Amino acid sequence: MDQRYKIFTWPFNQQYLFELAQGDFDIYIPEGQNSSFQQQFSSQKNVIETNEAAIKDLSLDCILFQDEYSYKTAQYEVLSDQQRQLPKIYLEHHPPKQHPTNAKHLVEDQDVQLVHVNHYNALMWDNNQLQVTVIENGVTTNTVNFTGEKASGVVVLEEFPADGRVTGRDIFMQVKEALLLEVVQIGKEDVTYQNLPEKLSQYRFLFCPDRYASPGFAVYLAMMTGMPVVGLATTDLPALISSEVSGFADSDLNYLICKMKVLLDNQQLAIQMGLEARKTALQRFNQNRFLKDWKQMLENTIASKPLLIKI
């Protein structure tokens, strides 16, 4: 019988954790998460908030880090000496920010399994010759029917803040002056990741103005809904979108504006491209593949570390 792994982590990307929690894992986190987290995970029994004083008593299989604070500081404050000897995984969500090609990743310990969320990030980071695994994102298959009936594009603002240049706020403003473009924000007006496909389904396309960020979960959810995606051909987005087939990706903003206007004038084209986007999502970004990759990576990582005697 397959082992049910017990993982301790510090929440970083709420939706990523939710998708991971659909697997056959028990995930322990520090207690005191915000109301948005409590609402999303209220029925997720395998995500267990734990009082800080009780964390050291947990019997765990591995530790999952997702940011610098948890790796460099928090682990020494909340984990026992024995827990810090467990197999460790560092999940990197972002491309390098200090320098696009020469930035060294903060993890240098050869015993830590480094995981990237896409191949672009893995390529651009200096990974310190660590063992690297890429696990592309996966999302739940939904049954929402994309209509594209509203002759407007949409931009999704996700929860965690980021630099305005990085996320292309100026690009958004420029496009908004040229065509009809609305904003949907996670956490506002009852919008959640769970109902986002329904909220998006009436819009003609999803626009991603990001200059230098990993594609957000809104991109994968839109594709799974059967919605065309338009965005700058930067970071990993060109690997998700087949330009002029399932959407448009280009570094020429004027070209993208022209193509977005074409979609606004042609609902049927948007539906046709959206079907291609959904095909890609079903093949590459389905939840079963995502969880299978995680299970395999956990098995390999935990098996490579000598077992500790738990007293």
Image (cartoon, rainbow, N blue to C red):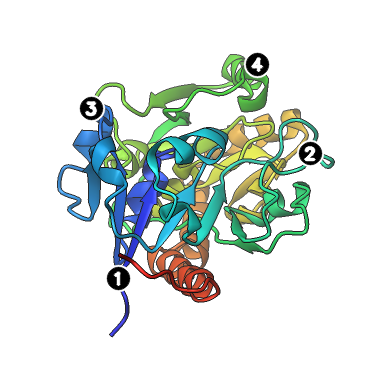
- Residue to which mark 3 is pinned: 35
Query: Label 2 sits on what residue type?
Result: Ala
CB atoms at circles 4 and 1 under 8 Å apart?
A: no
Residue 290 visible in the picture: yes
Q: Helix, strand, or loop for circle 1?
A: loop
Q: Earlier in the sequence, mark 3 or mark 1?
A: 1
Q: Residue at x 49, y 76 (%)?
A: 303
- Residue to which mark 2 is pinned: 103
Query: Label 3 sits on what residue type?
Result: Ser
Query: Label 1 sits on what residue type?
Result: Arg
- Residue to which mark 4 is pinned: 170
Residue 215 lies in quadrant: top right
Farthest-out residue, front: 311
Q: Residue at x 20, y 35 (%)?
A: 39
- Residue to which mark 1 is pinned: 4
Whole-percent x and y of residue 297?
51, 69
Q: Residue at x 73, y 29 (%)?
A: 253
Q: Earlier in the sequence, mark 3 or mark 2?
A: 3
Residue 146 visible in the picture: no
Whole-percent x and y of residue 244?
66, 52
Between the residue at mark 4 and the residue at mark 1, the CA separation in whole angstroms equals 46 Å
Q: Residue at x 56, y 24 (%)?
A: 162
Q: Count numbered badges in the picture.
A: 4
Q: Earlier in the sequence, mark 2 or mark 4?
A: 2
Q: Helix, strand, or loop for circle 4?
A: helix
